[in-house]
Amino acid sequence: MKPNFFSLLLLTAFFNTLLLSSCGSVSSKNFSIQFMDAPKVIQAGSSISWELHNPSQYAVDNLNFSLNDQNTTENKITFNENQLGHHLLKATFEVNGKPIEVSKNITVFASKKPVLYGYKIINSFPHDINAYTQGLEFYKGELYESTGQYGASSLRKVNFTTGEVIQKLPLNNSYFGEGITILNDQIFQLTWKENIGFVYDPSTFELLKSFSYIKSLEGWGLCNDGEQLYKSDGSEHIWILDADNQSELSKITAVTNNKVIKNINELEWVDGKIYANTYQFNKEVGIIIDPISGAVEGVVDFSGLKQKVKKHPKLDVLNGIAFHPTRKTFFVTGKNWDKLFEVAIFKK
């Protein structure tokens, strides 16, 4: 028996309702961005291309791709050495007028493995065993140190040969002192979770002003290149700060040829590179970072240093690295270490 006209109307209405219901359930879960012929580890020099994966073959309108919120007209890119770190690839489009967005994270690694360095002890000097060292820097021949812990944080000037604290400014108990650096005859000191830094006169330790940091997570290490400040926040990022107003201008991401290096701590600027302490490898190491690309160009194996200091309950990790510009040597210590080591660093 042939269906009558009324039955056809009901059938058509049913399928229209089903279609609308199906379209209404479409979401970002129905789509993804898929790489085509991408390497397992994307490094500088790698080329990748992509497409919108649409397994259900929905009709897609107004498809656009963007990389780090910048529209891209081509579905491919070749990353260079200055594009290391994290990137966000997005696809925005419409299905039956409904806007949908999907994204995919990309991490670009350095093209070369870091060079391995060792060290040689030249001298060892006394160091305050109660100093939870957070920052260390030479300025005009004097060693300046920042210490941490709530209720014990301070800014200090130290006689590095005797360990004597020449000058000391305790911080308020509500602040946990972190890294320091000295630029334009001003000391910059970070705090840990308080999102505030302080600026002092290096001669008198007079507080000149304070500043806040908004984009970076916390305050860890600090150094400068003679013009700008570089700040670590415990993540894989190092932030570049305006020296005049301390605003966060940009950031780099520390990566090797196959790893993202997190927990970057105390920083020191030497000959155009950033030397840093880090917890990343769960042992006594330093890393050498290119400040433009973020590539970790070297790893300094400081193993054995901690075994040369006095053992006690508060003994903690290696932290504190300062370069002496006249002696051309590095000075390193740790949190609650009773010694400050003068070392030479060399390629293995």
Image (cartoon, rainbow, N blue to C red):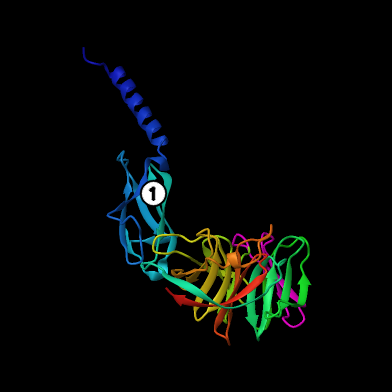
Residue 33 is inside the magenta segment: no
| Vertical comparison of 41 with 113: above or below | above
Q: Residues within 10 Å of mark 1 (few under 14, many from 20)?
A: some
Q: In which quadrant will I find the C terminus?
A: bottom left
121 sits left or right of 295 in the view: right
Q: Position of residue 286 (x, y in %)?
A: 52, 68
Task: Tell me the residue at 37%/54% (across/down).
Answer: 64
The residue lying furthest to the top in this view is 1
Q: Relative to residue 143, is residue 305 depicted above or below?
A: above
The magenta segment: 190-218
Quarter of the figure with residue 54: top left
Residue 82 position, x and y percent, is 41, 70
For the N terminus, which image quadrant? top left
Residue 183 in sight from this viewpoint: no
Residue 203 lies in the magenta stretch: yes
Q: Residue at x 55, y 81 (%)?
A: 329
Is residue 167 or residue 14 the one in the foreground? 167
What element does badge 1 sit on?
Answer: strand
Q: Position of residue 148 (x, y in %)?
A: 70, 64
Residue 199's quadrant in the figure? bottom right
Would residue 335 appear left or right of 20 to someone viewing this image? Answer: right
Tell me where residue 5 sits by quadrant.
Answer: top left
Please, which residue is most extreme toward the left here?
A: 1
Residue 29: x percent and y percent? 41, 40
Q: Is residue 58 left or right of residue 136?
A: left
Amino acid marked by disc 1: Phe
Q: Which residue is mark 1?
A: 93
As rendered, which of 84 and 9 lies closer to the eye? 84
